[in-house]
Image (tube, rainbow, N blue to C red):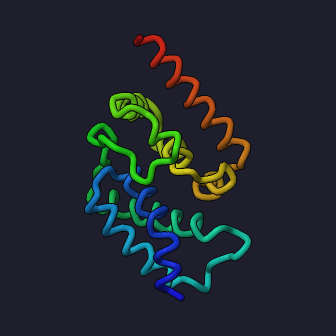
Amino acid sequence: MIEEFYKNYYHIVYGFLLSLCADPSMAEELTAETFFKAIEKIHTYDPKYKPSTWLCTIGKNLYYNECRRKKRHLPLDEASYIAAPSPEVLHMKKDEAQQILKLLEQFSEENRQLFLMRLEGMSFRDIGLALGMSETLARVTYFRIKSKIRSEMEGEK
């Protein structure tokens, strides 16, 4: 059962953590730690939420703890890819993806997370739960970010 759980959600958790830290080896370590914590704390899981939301929340907290421990913030400007891309991202040209990642730097960390979680295919409901906001706020924030990025990309052409 644990192996199946890991197999079903590894890709989502790893992709989410990679979008946060932009470091494949750190994302790998955090992903393993996330599943370890989840097994330890399985009694706290509320089945009314999706397991992926719960796991991403654990992973996000572990990442923040690691950043506090190291007293640093890992910027997205070094990222040249987005892990676990949605079909929308798969069709995007590499230079456009890099340009979007560069433009995302102007937003708060929470807004970058929200945008990347949506690109990973998470629902607005799950994004809201993971980030502690309403589904509506997640949806509105995503579309504002998307509109701003789109207008800035069109302005550069």
Count of numbered circles on the image: 0
Q: Is residue 70 above or below residue 156?
A: below
Looking at this view, name the residue that lies furthest to the bottom.
1
Q: Is residue 145 above or below residue 33?
A: above
Left or right side of 50 for 33: left
At 52% from the left edge and 45% from the top edge, which residue is drawn? 87
Q: Is residue 60 above or below residue 103?
A: below
At 68% from the left edge and 76% from the top edge, which residue is drawn? 46
Q: Position of residue 49 (x, y in %)?
A: 68, 68
Q: Position of residue 10 (x, y in %)?
A: 45, 69
Q: Position of residue 113 (x, y in %)?
A: 49, 46
User: Of residues 76 and 133, which is closer to you in this image?
Assistant: 76
Q: Is residue 131 above or below residue 51?
A: above
Is residue 9 at least partly visible in the picture?
Answer: yes
Where is the N terminus found, in terms of image quarters?
Answer: bottom right
User: Of residues 31 and 119, which is closer to you in this image?
Assistant: 119
Left or right side of 150 for 50: right
Q: Position of residue 27 (x, y in %)?
A: 34, 61
At 53% from the left edge and 69% from the top edge, which residue is drawn? 55
Task: State the image quarter where residue 90 is shown.
Answer: top left
Where is the C terminus found, in terms of image quarters?
Answer: top left
Is residue 64 at least partly visible in the picture?
Answer: no
At 65% from the left edge and 43% from the top edge, which residue is drawn? 138
